[in-house]
DNA sequence: CTTGAGATGTTT
DNA sequence: AACATCTCAAGA
């Protein structure tokens, strides 16, 4: 029986920091999901967004817990999946100490493994259109309500983020988020993108 | 290339 | 009523 040399998961301690620190550190790392069939889906993270608890745009704003955002206040390394616009799921990794309501939105990946499966789910052959947006990558990876609360730091979890692959700081662009939710107090909401990377989402 | 509308249903 | 979005069609 030949077994793939298993790459180490990022440990929980990696996520137990401010979202604005974790978000850029996630760039370049590989998100992996092992399907029940044994099939591997993977992609290199190229765009993230930090949501601190004191950002008005965050679902956890003000520390107020609701049925939806409960996972955000759980242990770091949990996957927070939410449903939006009546048809899309988006996925985050919970950051900070247990009880903090912060997380990093996964916004874009470069598809690596399982591209045919992703293409079928996304109904397109264009590799640039498989994971170039938060709802796109969620659909390609099959993230939905069942994955909400998955523990990426647990060896039992089918979903993980591999250690290694970190990107040099000069290759990371940081931009304040613009659009819905802007206003006083939202200046801490940052988007991080790998420079010169074509597989990113459309809007700035 | 850009812009704009419509889809769709949960949350507050 | 807003929404951490996406797709498609139309225009420049």
Image: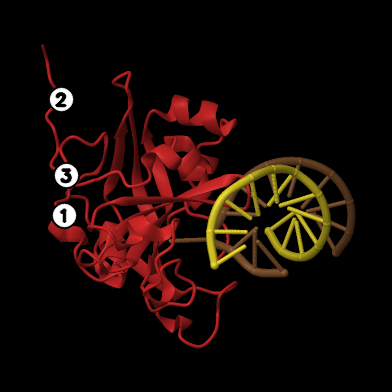
Chain colours: A red, B yellow, C brown
Q: Could you say which is closer to the camera, residue A68 or residue A202?
A: A68
- Residue A17 horizontal/vertical position (percent): 21, 68
Q: CA distance from mark 2 to mark 1?
A: 23 Å
Q: Quadrant of residue A74?
A: bottom left
Q: Could you say which is closer to the camera, residue B9 or residue A29?
A: B9
**In this rendering, would A138 be left or right of A104?**
right
The residue located at (30%, 58%) in the rendering is A94
Q: From the viewer's perspective, is residue A195 above or below residue A56?
A: above
Around disc 3, counting alpha carbons within 10 Å, would you say few (fewer than 14), some (14 to 19), or many (20 or more)?
some
Q: Read off the chain for label 3.
A: A
* First in residue order: circle 3 vs circle 2: 2
- Residue A138 horizontal/vertical position (percent): 46, 43
**Mark whose residue sits in front, 3 or 1:** 1
Q: Which mark is residue A4?
A: 2
Extreme residue in the bottom direction: A184
Q: Which mark is residue A86?
A: none
Q: Which residue is mark 1?
A: A12
The residue located at (45%, 69%) in the rendering is A58
Q: Which residue is mark 3?
A: A9
């Amino acid at each position: 029986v030949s077994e793939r040399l298993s790459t180490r998961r990022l440990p929980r301690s990696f996520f137990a920091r401010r979202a604005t620190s974790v978000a850029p550190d996630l760039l370049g790392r590989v998100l992996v999901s092992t399907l029940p069939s044994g099939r591997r889906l993977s992609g290199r993270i190229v765009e993230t967004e930090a949501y601190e608890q004191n950002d008005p745009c965050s679902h956890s704003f003000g520390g107020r817990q609701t049925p939806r955002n409960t996972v955000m206040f759980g242990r770091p390394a949990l996957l927070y999946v939410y449903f939006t616009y009546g048809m899309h799921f988006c996925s985050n990794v919970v950051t900070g100490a247990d009880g903090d309501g912060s997380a990093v939105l996964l916004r874009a990946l470069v598809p690596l493994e399982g591209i045919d499966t992703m293409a079928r789910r996304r109904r397109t052959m264009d590799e640039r259109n498989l994971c170039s947006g938060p709802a796109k990558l969620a659909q390609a990876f099959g993230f939905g309500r069942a994955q909400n609360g998955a523990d990426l730091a647990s060896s039992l979890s089918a979903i993980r983020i591999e250690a290694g692959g970190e990107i040099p700081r000069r290759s990371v662009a940081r931009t304040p988020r613009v659009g819905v939710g802007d206003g006083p107090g939202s200046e801490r909401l940052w988007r991080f993108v790998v420079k010169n990377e074509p597989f990113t989402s459309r809007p700035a």
